[in-house]
Amino acid sequence: MMKDRIYSDLYSRIEAILEGETDQIANMANTASLIHEAFGFWWTGFYIVRGNQLVLGPFQGPVACTRIPFGKGVCGTAWQKKETVVVPDVEKFPGHIACSSLSRSEIVVPISSPDGDVKGVLDIDSKELSTFDETDRLWLEKIVGLLWY
Ligand code: SME
């Protein structure tokens, strides 16, 4: 399947670019860029846990909300549940935080440290409905696994 091949190539490129670099901000920045360019998503970026909020981290795309409370929006929900949240239609997700009215579907993948603490989330938004499926979930979870140790 086409998407699988793009992800497989993307994973190798991210693995290579992160090799030898331990700075997490630098690594999140390049990861956001590579994912964004590979698929042409609307917004691709990271929110980082700071106390009881998520704070905007490295991203590609239009200006976004800077702070998201624990349990709020799709990002805060993924953090609270410690699991990936796939939203086929953001208008049907109660409490969705609309940073951009053009965003129609999204996926949020939590990033955990080896001891299971959520350190941040990867958030990807699409201008089309139902962009993300099980293939995206599996590969993006694998990709964020490269980011925190
Ligand atoms: N839609 C997100 C907010 C972040 S922006 O999409 C970049 C949410 O509800 O968590």
Image (spheres, rainbow, N blue to C red):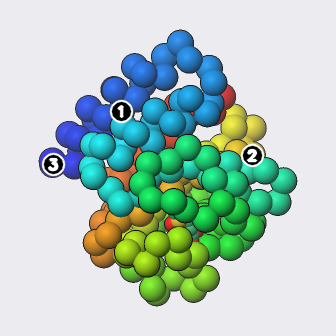
Query: Residue 110: where, in percent of width, then height?
Result: 59, 52
Instruction: Measure the C-alpha gap from mark 2 to mark 3.
Output: 33 Å
Residue 8: x percent and y percent? 28, 35
Kind of residue indicated by mark 2: Asp
Residue located 35% across and 65% down the image: 126
Instruction: Work out whether residue 81 can be spotted.
Output: no
Residue 125 lies, in percent from the top left, at 41, 63
- Distance between the alpha carbons at the discs numbered 2 and 1: 23 Å
**Few, some or many residues within 10 Å of mark 2 (<14, 14–19, 20+):** few
Determine if the C-beta at disc 2 is less than 8 A from ligand 1.
Answer: no
Quarter where residue 61 is shown: bottom left
List x then y, in percent, for residue 69.
Answer: 74, 67
What number is the disc on residue 117? 2
What amino acid does circle 3 point to?
Answer: Met
Residues at marks 2 and 1 touching, judged by CB atoms closer than 8 Å: no
How crowded pointer 1 is (Cα within 10 Å; few <14, some 14-19, many 20+) is rated as many
Count of marks placed on residues: 3
Residue type at numbered disc 1:
Tyr
Q: Residues within 10 Å of mark 3 (few under 14, many from 20)?
A: few
Give the side of residue 94 with respect to residue 31, left or right: right
- Disc on res. 11: 1
Mark 3 lies on residue = 1
Q: Which badge, 1 or 3, comes first in the chain's sequence?
A: 3
Identify the element where label 1 is drawn.
helix
